[in-house]
Image (cartoon, rainbow, N blue to C red):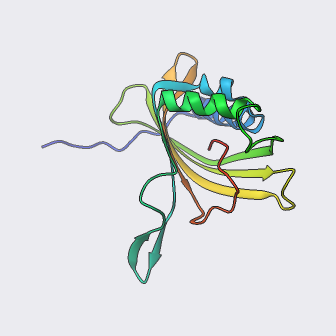
Amino acid sequence: MTTETAPRAVEDALYRRLCDFYYDEADLLSQRQYVKWFALLAEDIHYRVGFPEFYEHGTRRQIGIGNPYFDDNHVSLKVRTNLLGNPTTTTAENPPSIYNYFVTNIRARWATDEADAIDVESRLLIYRVRASEPVPYILGARRKDRLRVDGEGFRLARRDAMIDQSIIQSPNLSFLL
């Protein structure tokens, strides 16, 4: 018989460092600093962006085609960040959009299945202004991350982001969550 223990909350000083990590990450993504953002990733990163589940008359119904919008690893994220970071390789971001990323509701617990790993849940709001669109685009998402303590910093080992919209109003998803 095994006894499962509840995940331990992180201490206050570590929580503050985690918040700073997320605020710094938001600034990197807002400024399209994809090379610096990519440096935050663990070699075995698993990055997925999915769609929400809605409930109809008490039964579960999933909206979408059954696959995440993105299901990336270190190699595919390297390609994605290289494309997004170079204005000559993408027409979707030419001219570049203006982004503001807002991270909130950060909750962190020590992982129970991996040493020196922290499971973090957060909420994300992206405010995007495009030169060709008269109305700014707003996207909300819920994120579940696995961070690994790496010296004085952290490495993002897993991100599961669930977009709050079942129908994406943006003309493209040429940004990271």
Tell me residue 9's x, y (percent). 47, 39
Tell me residue 135's x, y (percent). 84, 62
Q: Nearer the viewer, residue 138 or 92?
A: 92
Q: Quadrant of the N terminus?
A: top left
Q: Residue furthest top?
A: 151
Give the answer, above or below, for where 171 lies relative to 23.
below
Give the answer, above or below, for where 60 lies relative to 91.
below
**Residue 94 occupies quadrant:** top right
Residue occupying image coordinates x 50% and y 35%: 10
Give the answer, above or below, for where 107 lies relative to 65.
above
Residue occupying image coordinates x 21% and y 43%: 3
Q: Quadrant of the C terminus?
A: top right
Tell me residue 77's x, y (percent). 55, 32
* Residue 126 relative to residue 71: left or right: right
Residue occupying image coordinates x 58% and y 18%: 152
Tell me residue 140's x, y (percent). 65, 56
Q: Residue furthest left?
A: 1
Q: Nearer the viewer, residue 82 or 10?
A: 82
Q: Nearer the viewer, residue 25 or 19?
A: 25
Residue occupying image coordinates x 63% and y 41%: 176
Counting labels gives 0
